[in-house]
Image (cartoon, rainbow, N blue to C red):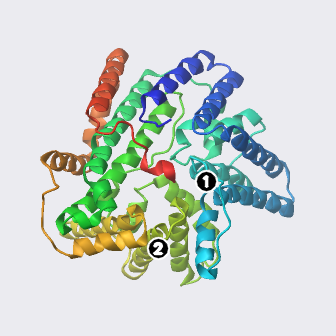
């Protein structure tokens, strides 16, 4: 059930209608949320109805032990068990085939068959679930004795497929507090959902179907100019696809009185790679920083912090998928972060201004776009072929249309629109009557479904 599909919005309306009449009763509220979570999983595969409750229950037990045990060894065993269970779950779904294939290539022996594949990889579930036990181990948050609250928070349906990765303790705290249906929050939610649909259907899907997918599938059929524009178009596509999902997810949660963290902040306006990761997929970069980078040794060393940055981003690349293309993508960003850190150590952290600021933004955007080639490519060979087509310097615009140029321009301009313009639009929408907001959103959905070339296509980050 895609978050851009009509089925999802029917589901969301049903959850909304069940949720608010019982919102004064904590147990009933949690029961509605948990039912919605598991129904959402079941729409992908019924096996999740056995897997998710079992894994969540184990983490709940580990969490109880971490809350009440003061023995350092016991606490270490409990958090290690949680990490091994969750990472093992993720590895069995995503990484075993990758390692078996590479081991087969090295040993030149047939790899054993591995058929344990699920439609949703659970990457976001695992990272979100680990925030609970690790935070308890570090004593960074309080746990819960409510089994129902833990199950509802750890599998909260808007964050299931592609985040934002939200600390479980934050969700539990919000579930525990009494809520009331706020008209302003409802308006913000509908505005975010509408923006997410426009980003996904009007820009991301159009760029993907019209140029990006074709060029990356058959690069030899396109000129160097067309291939280069397709690479830039992919930079826009992945941003509007992923931020569109995030807007819909945040809006869906807000309709239930739950606030999710911000995940994007105009990433292509970043002045360096470190700034980019403060703006792009913010909850993932925060997770990697808080739970991986800060856990690595060598903080007082002069060399290890650079290696740790590189290692963290390689792991971040592998988290996206079991392929060498993701390893290279992560390594490029790790190298970029290490260079930025070295520059800041040698030259200071003062911000550049004027021409040099725009030059820094331009260079950062092009570096990020170059790395996106490996992220999008189906294989390393495919990425190298894309680069060779760009390097051919052949010029042709036969496959570039006026509608493509228009959507491309809209994507660029919308990304760099001043924040105060966005805030003004949001305030105007929130001030409108609720029925006008709902009518505007309904008309938008109908219009976008009509103009969308391929209907509701999967979000890019669904597969991660």
Q: Is residue 85 above or below residue 393?
A: above
Residue at figure coordinates x 61%, y 31% from the top left = 39
Where, by quadrant of the figure, is residue 273 drawn?
bottom left
Where, by quadrant of the figure, is residue 37 drawn?
top right
- Is 126 displayed left or right of 388 in the figure? right
- Is 232 displayed left or right of 256 in the figure? left
Name the residue tied to disc 2. 331
Numbered label attached to residue 127 = 1
Helix, strand or loop status at disc 1: helix
User: How far apart are the two marked residues, 2 and 1, measured between alpha carbons?
Assistant: 21 Å
In this rendered view, identify the residue nearer to me: 190 or 117: 117
**Can you name the residue that lies furthest to the front here?**
110
Categorize mark 1 by other alpha carbons within 10 Å: few (<14), some (14-19), many (20+): many
Residue 249 in picture, x, y percent from top left: 47, 38
Residue 165 in sight: yes
First in residue order: circle 2 vs circle 1? 1
In this rendered view, identify the residue nearer to me: 20 or 39: 39
Residue at figure coordinates x 17%, y 74% from the top left = 393
Residue at figure coordinates x 35%, y 36% from the top left = 455
Residue 454 in picture, x, y percent from top left: 33, 39
In this rendered view, identify the residue nearer to me: 314 or 346: 314
Residue 220 in picture, x, y percent from top left: 26, 67
Residue 351 in sight: no
């Amino acid at each position: 059930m895609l978050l851009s599909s009509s089925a999802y919005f029917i589901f969301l309306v049903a959850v909304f209608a069940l949720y608010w009449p019982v919102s004064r009763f904590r147990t009933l509220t949690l029961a509605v949320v948990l039912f919605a979570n598991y129904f959402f999983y079941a729409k992908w595969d019924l096996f999740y109805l056995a897997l998710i409750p079992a894994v969540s229950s184990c983490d709940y037990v580990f969490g109880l032990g971490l809350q009440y045990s003061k023995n350092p060894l016991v606490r270490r065993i409990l958090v290690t068990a949680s990490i091994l269970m969750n990472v093992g779950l993720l590895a069995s779904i995503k990484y075993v085939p990758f390692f078996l294939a590479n081991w087969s290539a090295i040993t030149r022996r047939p790899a054993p068959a591995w058929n344990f594949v699920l439609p949703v990889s659970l990457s976001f579930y695992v990272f979100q679930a680990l925030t609970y036990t690790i935070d308890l181990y570090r004593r960074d948050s309080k746990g819960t004795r409510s089994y129902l609250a833990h199950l509802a928070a750890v599998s909260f349906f808007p964050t299931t497929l592609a985040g934002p990765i939200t600390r479980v303790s934050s969700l539990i705290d919000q579930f525990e507090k009494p809520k009331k249906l706020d008209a302003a929050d409802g308006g913000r939610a509908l505005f975010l959902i509408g923006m997410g649909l426009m980003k996904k259907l009007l820009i991301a899907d159009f760029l993907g179907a019209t140029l990006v997918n074709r060029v990356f599938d058959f690069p030899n059929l396109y000129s160097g100019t067309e291939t280069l524009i397709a690479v830039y178009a992919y930079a826009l596509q992945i941003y509007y696809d992923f931020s569109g999902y995030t807007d819909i997810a945040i809006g869906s949660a807000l309709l239930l009185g739950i606030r999710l963290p911000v995940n994007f902040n105009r990433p292509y306006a970043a002045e360096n790679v470190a700034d980019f990761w403060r703006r792009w997929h913010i909850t993932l970069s925060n997770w990697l920083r808080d739970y991986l980078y800060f856990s690595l040794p060598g903080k007082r060393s002069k060399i290890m912090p650079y290696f740790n940055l590189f290692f963290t981003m390689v792991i971040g690349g592998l988290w996206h998928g079991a392929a060498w293309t993701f390893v290279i993508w992560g390594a490029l960003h790790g190298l970029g972060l290490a260079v930025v850190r070295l520059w800041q150590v040698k030259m200071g952290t003062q911000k550049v201004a004027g021409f040099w600021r725009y030059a820094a933004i331009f260079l950062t955007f092009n570096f990020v776009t170059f790395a996106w080639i490996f992220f999008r490519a189906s294989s390393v060979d495919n990425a190298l072929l894309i680069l060779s087509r760009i390097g051919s310097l052949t010029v042709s615009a036969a496959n570039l249309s006026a509608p493509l140029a228009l959507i491309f321009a809209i994507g660029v301009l919308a990304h760099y629109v001043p924040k105060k313009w966005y805030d003004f639009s949001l305030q105007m929408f929130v001030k409108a009557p609720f029925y006008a907001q709902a009518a505007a959103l309904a008309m938008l959905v109908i219009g976008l479904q009509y103009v969308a070339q391929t209907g509701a296509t999967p979000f890019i980050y669904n597969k991660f």
